[in-house]
Image (tube, rainbow, N blue to C red):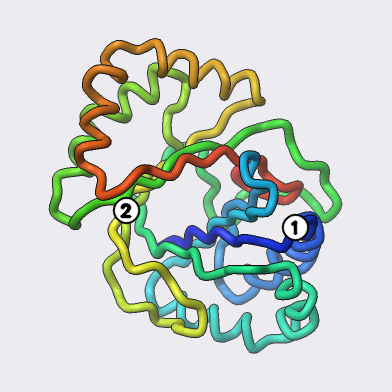
Amino acid sequence: MVDLRQYTLRPGQRDTLVDVFDEYFVDGQEATGMHIAGQFRDLDRPDRFVWIRGFPDYETRKAASEAFYTGPVWRAHAATANATMIDSDNVLLLTPLWFGDGFPRLGSPRPPVGADAPDSVVAGAVYHRGSADDGFVEFFGDHVVPELTASGAEPVVVLESLVAENNFPALPMRDEIVLAWFARFDDDAAYDEHRRRLQSSARWQQFVLPELVCRSARPAQELRLRPTGRSQLR
């Protein structure tokens, strides 16, 4: 299972959180059994920090969260991290529908502390659904994925909401049904080319996109992200 976490930060404080996160929180969390798959600067929202945290199962999520948030790494750096944040409750609990080869697994190589951020872009979207049995997953697989892949944005991971109680309530989560996907691009030019191809696709414009809008409970959230120096998804 996966937490997709989006934090709204105080103006000018994102680099402070990124530095603390990459130097201390990545290794500190993984020592408790979590997997920090990716952490990112939002390229369209200068005060937004986005990260993806995985757990092998529901029970590990509770035990690992308790261990980290009562442990020495969090105690030493919590004040610095919390001082950067306005809101940290924008969190979705998700389960993977499929992983591609480009999504990092636990134990995948990770750049060292101090590594430069890459030029790559990780992009995707969060679709807000009406219910868990709305046929959205089937439509996405049959119609959306082929269009994304043809435009150069083959998803490296597709996730949907895990309908379960939050077993670490000290960290709130959003209670809604979504589908989310992410793809990676070598650089800004590759991402821009994907957008150009998608916008010029008659099938996307005339059928897939209108159908996505009709099937969604509210407008999708599009994400365009830059990995930090230590992000595995990069």
Circle 2 is placed at which residue position?
178
Q: How many marks?
A: 2
The location of residue 186, given as percent across then percent down, is 63, 26
Residue 98 relative to residue 70: left or right: left
The location of residue 70, given as percent across then percent down, is 64, 88
Q: Is residue 234 visible?
A: no
Residue 138 relative to residue 11: left or right: left
Above or below, 175 relative to 168: above
Which numbered disc, 2 or 1, marks the residue closer to the eye?
1
Q: Are marks 2 and 1 in contact (CB under 8 Å)?
A: no
Q: Is residue 87 visible?
A: yes
- Which is nearer the eye, 110 or 185? 185
Report helix, strand or loop for mark 1.
loop
Amino acid, disc 2: Val
Q: Earlier in the sequence, mark 2 or mark 1?
A: 1
> Which residue: 20% across, 54% down?
130
**Res 20 label:** none
Disc 2 residue crowd, few under 14, some 14–19, many 20+, Cα 10 Å: many
Quadrant for residue 43, please give it: top right
- Which is nearer the eye, 90 or 190? 90
**Res 11 label:** 1
> Which residue: 78% across, 60% down?
13
> Which residue: 55% across, 58% down?
6
Amino acid, disc 1: Pro
Image quadrant containing the C terminus: top right
Image quadrant containing the N terminus: bottom left
Q: Residue furthest right?
A: 114
The location of residue 71, given as percent across then percent down, is 68, 86
> Which residue: 62% across, 80% down?
68
